[in-house]
Amino acid sequence: MQDFLRRFARNQAAIVGVVILLVVIALALLAPVLYPDSPWDMVTEPFLAPGADRAHPLGSDMMGRDLAAGIFHGARVSLMIGIVATLVALAVGVTIGAIAGYYGGWVDNVLMRVTELFQTIPAFIFAIVLVSIFQPSVTSIVLAIGTVSWPPVARLTRSEFLTLRSREFVQACITIGMGDLRIIVLHVLPNALAPIIVTGSLMVATAILTEAGLAFLGLGDPNVMSWGTIIGAGRDVLRTAAYVTAIPGIAILLTVLALNLVGEGLNDALNPKLKNR
Amino acid sequence: MPRVVRYLAWRLLQAIPIVAGIAVFNFMLLQFAPGDAADVLAGEAGGATPEYIAQLKARFGLDQPVPVQLGKYLWNVARLDLGFSFRHNMPVVDLILSHLPATLLLMGAAIVLAFSLGVLLGVTAARHVNRPLDTIISVGALLAYATPIFWIGLMMILLFSVQLGWLPSSGMRTIGADLTGFTYAIDVVRHLVLPATALSLFFMALYTRLMRASMLEVYSLDYVTTARAKGLTERRVAFKHVLRNALLPMVTMLGLQVGSMLGGSVLVETVFGWPGLGRLAFEAVFQRDNNLLLGILLLSSVLVVIVNVVIDLTYARLDPRIEVG
């Protein structure tokens, strides 16, 4: 573990990622403290330029809503949806991949056909269809993103399980009569965890981009303010007040960048041999 | 040649269960959707008598048991009948096919741009590994990889259309201009530049990173050392010896990314008002046109299957060790 931390800390890019990510997490945590009122509330005059009023450092949009409040609350929404959707995808993907890889045979065959099916359907269009049919809400968005992003996890877990399955320690577990569930959860899974964690951290980034895209198209939860929603609304005033669109976009960019850097840092630290490839 | 034909037939046969699976899935989603076509039509008319709704349901076959409806749906899909869009007053298939060329043009341009520039940048970065040029390219790729596609599109409109006034910001052709032949093509290309660039940026970043990694891996192989020992120039080693083998993973990636590019084109077409499938999907969402939306989902999946078959064939051509069939 210490070895891992040392290797991770040596990676400058990953540290930059961690710092940005901590800032975003701080925004999310401070949102209810600094901006206890709804970010949808009109608090000042419309089209207040950024920096013109110290009370509203990022200015306001066409409805006089404080952009800074939107950015803070948006951080909450983005991180929450990104993380929960990834957990959903990991739960489904790891379960399917583990069963397929551990049991092999026709079970594997059937599960991989299903995975292939899901992988063929264009993910973002699939997410649009799911959210629009089940009506936009935080739950439907999380489930839709989870539904479209589990196949790579299943494939990864399956291949890990396939190789681990034939190792001596697993054979030993089988010989002493241990139950399948116990072998899978306590013995095989911990050994397959490293690449799954790396994939998971990169998936949060993709999930945040997907959520932003959905919200931009107007498929965000109408009750929460997401960065994508602000961009979607700011689009109408692009010519006169570009900052309304620009600022939340930069927030998304930095968050996604940070997650990618952290994910790659984890990858390098967990697989030191692959470094510099 | 017959071997290729046989392979194609075999692959298409394999694709049938996938397409059928997606069709079943589509049907299930339609069942889940609140309100069926009859309810929607009745609601539109501002309410209707129960008798009228029952009559509508009978007309659409909605009063039949679910398995019968599923059978009918699958039979219709097999005959390429994806239902009727009441909003556009047109069969869904006709609607999709009329919007497909615009999307294919946009995606084709974006793929060519992303692939060629990605290869070029990746090779350059690999040849200057850990030197300033590599750092600049790698940081640029990291940033492009994290940028929301729709946002960069809006920023490009702001810079190139609003500020500089160089390129049109929306649509596929100048409305009202009666252009033909060459001038028409130029007009479309001018409209294409911004959306294609916006769509390609993410994929260009992906290909640059992959190409760099792939080149570095091939560089470490023995045959490259041999090539250098023969006294070949670095340029010749890079382009004649390393590039060809490093390209293989890129082609695989291309196949994996088709679906994701289709998704990206929904966003880009919405931003730039490009009259393709993505824009049609966006409209279908807001018009609650589920038939159309699910038709787009099905046909875009079919498109992914077709492109992947084509890519497998290309793969066999690039690497003679891989045989078709």
Image (tube, grey):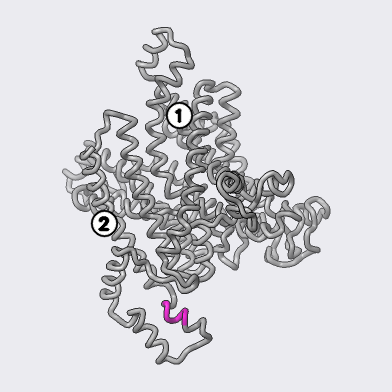
Q: Nearer the viewer, residue A10 or A127?
A: A127
Tell me where the magenta segment starts and ends, as one range.
Answer: B37-41
Numbered disc 2: secondary structure: helix
How many numbered marks have been drawn onto this rendered protein structure?
Answer: 2
Identified at 72% across, 49% down, the residue is B162
Q: Which of B249 and B296 is in front in this view?
A: B296
- Residue type of the residue flagged with mark 1: Ala
* Residue B266 relative to residue A68: left or right: left
Q: Examine the rendered structure and indicate whether residue B49 appears above or below residue A160.
A: below
Return the x and y of residue B25 as percentages of the image width and height. Answer: 34, 64
Identified at 46% across, 69% down, the residue is A134
Q: Which of B111 and B133 is in front in this view?
A: B111
Identified at 40% across, 44% down, the residue is B256
Q: Respond whether the residues carrying marks 2 and 1 are from the same subunit.
A: yes
Q: Please state the chain letter of the residue tagged with numbered disc 1 in the rendered image.
A: B
The disc placed on residue B17 is: 2
Return the x and y of residue A106 as percentages of the image width and height. Answer: 19, 52
Q: Examine the rendered structure and indicate whether residue B202 appears above or below residue A40.
A: above
Residue neighbourhood size for the residue with mark 2, other residues' Cα within 10 Å, grouped as few (<14), some (14–19), many (≥20): few
Instruction: Report, in whole angstroms, how far the alpha carbon at label 2 lies from the one at label 1.
Output: 36 Å
Return the x and y of residue A158 as percentages of the image width and height. Answer: 30, 45
Q: Counting residues from the N terminus, which is met first, the one under dot 2 or under dot 1? A: 2
Q: Is the N terminus of chain A in the top left, top right, bottom left or bottom right quadrant?
A: top left
Numbered disc 1: secondary structure: helix
Q: Which of marks 2 and 1 is in front?
A: 2
The disc placed on residue B213 is: 1
